[in-house]
Image (cartoon, helix red, strand yellow):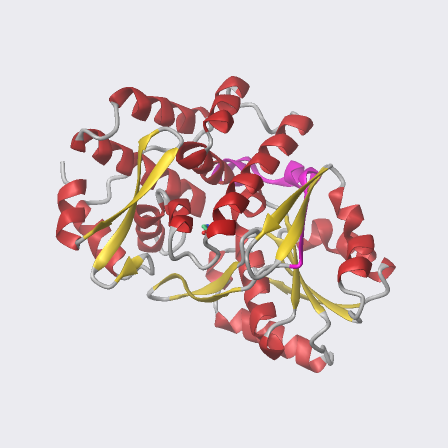
């Protein structure tokens, strides 16, 4: 088991990572939330049958009364109706400011649980218990919470840091292969933008990290530490944190245009591949480095391209929250391990993407 301290500006907290880590929950809750009486467990229909009772037992051990809200698994549930149902559950059960929301699931769950906690009574504690690789290395840490609206993903939300994140890597054993692969989109992203040591480790593992418990724990912890070092400097995403959006400007458009049927991590991988191609064409990224990064994506079963047109990307990016004023923040990797934020007009972005 390892602990990575996450210093996020408005709140500093532990991310506890390891096989069986869920068993620390009761002790940590007693320590961190001594005034808590009730907890709402937010989960979804795939995860709840597997892990909800385990988490409930931990909360009961900590002396808490529990309620739960289980929604239909999938990005389509990530809307205001689900969050309103969570608010109502908490209000009906008489939750107060010292009570807790527990997010038990993947990124959709931790984003919505975090948003419900951020907004109920103007903010109560949230403890995240991510069950997918993507949520462990990205979505559940760093305090971005929110929901989708028809015009785009995560368009409504709040920065609200958890009080604790417990990442039980044994939960990854039940993850379908394609969902594990999706998480590798964010893992490889961290390697490309800031962590050549992680990149080498992933290359050396030759695509096999899932069944090696120690390696998996180490890789998850490296990703959490990478993200912590970025969020520490820029909690509210006005500067360096934007490098974490590598592949996302394009990826979010592909994802939204598919009606959210294509998985997020897969779309991010496609987005990273398309930006790498554009950097090579612009002469700023060496073909060898691009090949090395794309080979790594493919080694872990991820795509590196998509047939989306530059016109569709630019049109979609204009509605994205990564747009500031008339400019689109495009994240480039021109050297492995170093990302840069380039502000482009829509015309410049179109030229950059066009073959
Ligand atoms: N997922 C990117 C971020 O947390 O900033």
Q: How far across and down, in percent of the image, does residue 167 sit?
A: 67, 45
Q: How far across and down, in percent of the image, does residue 255 sit?
A: 36, 51
- Residue 261's place in the image compared with 84, above or below, is above
Residue lying at 65% horizontally and 71% vertically, measured from the top left: 124
Would residue 243 be found to the left or right of residue 165 on screen? left
Residue lying at 78% horizontally and 69% vertically, measured from the top left: 36
Q: Quadrant of the N terminus?
A: top right
Would residue 351 be found to the left or right of residue 322 on screen? left
Residue lying at 80% horizontally and 47% vertically, measured from the top left: 23
Would residue 281 be found to the left or right of residue 177 on screen? left
In the rendered image, residue 113 lying in the magenta stretch gets the answer no
Q: Name the foreground residue: 33 vs 11.
A: 11
Res. 235 visible in picture: yes
In the rendered image, residue 170 lying in the magenta stretch gets the answer yes
Q: How many marks?
A: 0
Res. 263 visible in picture: no
Would residue 182 be found to the left or right of residue 141 on screen? left
Q: Name the foreground residue: 322 vs 268.
A: 322
Magenta: main secondary structure: helix
Magenta residues (range): 163-182
Residue lying at 70% horizontally and 53% vertically, measured from the top left: 49
Q: How far across and down, in percent of the image, does residue 229 sit?
A: 52, 44
Q: Quadrant of the C terminus?
A: top left
Q: How far across and down, in percent of the image, does residue 346 sit?
A: 17, 54
Q: Name the foreground residue: 323 vs 184.
A: 323
- Residue 204's place in the image compared with 351, above or below, is above
């Amino acid at each position: 088991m390892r602990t990575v301290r996450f210093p996020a500006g408005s709140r500093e907290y532990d991310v506890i990572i390891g096989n069986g880590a869920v068993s620390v929950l009761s002790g940590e809750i007693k320590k961190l939330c001594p005034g808590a009486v009730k907890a709402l467990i937010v989960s979804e229909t795939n995860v709840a049958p597997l892990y909800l009772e385990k988490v409930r037992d931990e909360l009961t051990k900590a002396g808490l009364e529990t309620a739960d809200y289980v929604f239909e698994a999938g990005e389509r549930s990530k809307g205001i109706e689900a969050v309103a149902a969570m608010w109502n559950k908490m209000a009906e059960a008489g939750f107060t400011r010292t009570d807790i929301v527990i997010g038990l699931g993947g990124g959709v769950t931790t984003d919505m649980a975090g948003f419900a906690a951020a907004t109920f009574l103007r903010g109560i504690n949230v403890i995240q218990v991510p069950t997918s690789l993507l949520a462990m290395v990205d979505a559940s840490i760093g305090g971005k919470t929110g929901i989708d609206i028809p015009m785009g993903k995560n368009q409504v939300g709040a920065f609200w840091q958890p009080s604790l994140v417990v990442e039980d890597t044994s939960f990854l054993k039940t993850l379908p292969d394609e969902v594990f692969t999706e998480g590798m989109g964010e893992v490889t992203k961290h390697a490309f933008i800031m962590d050549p040591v992680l990149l080498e480790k992933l290359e050396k593992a030759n695509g096999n990290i899932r069944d090696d418990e120690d390696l998996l724990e180490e890789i998850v912890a490296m990703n959490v530490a990478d993200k912590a070092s970025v969020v520490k400097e820029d909690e509210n995403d006005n500067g360096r944190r934007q490098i974490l959006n590598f592949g996302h400007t394009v990826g979010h458009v592909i994802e939204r245009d598919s009606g959210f049927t294509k998985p997020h991590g897969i779309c991010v991988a496609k987005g990273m591949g398309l930006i790498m191609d554009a950097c090579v064409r612009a002469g700023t990224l060496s073909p060898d480095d691009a090949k090395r990064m794309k080979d790594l994506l493919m080694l872990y079963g991820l795509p590196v391209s998509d047939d989306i047109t530059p016109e569709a990307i630019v049109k979609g990016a204009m509605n994205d929250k990564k747009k500031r004023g008339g400019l689109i923040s495009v994240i480039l990797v021109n050297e492995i391990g170093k990302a840069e934020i380039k502000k482009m007009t829509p015309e410049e972005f179109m030229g950059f993407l066009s073959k």
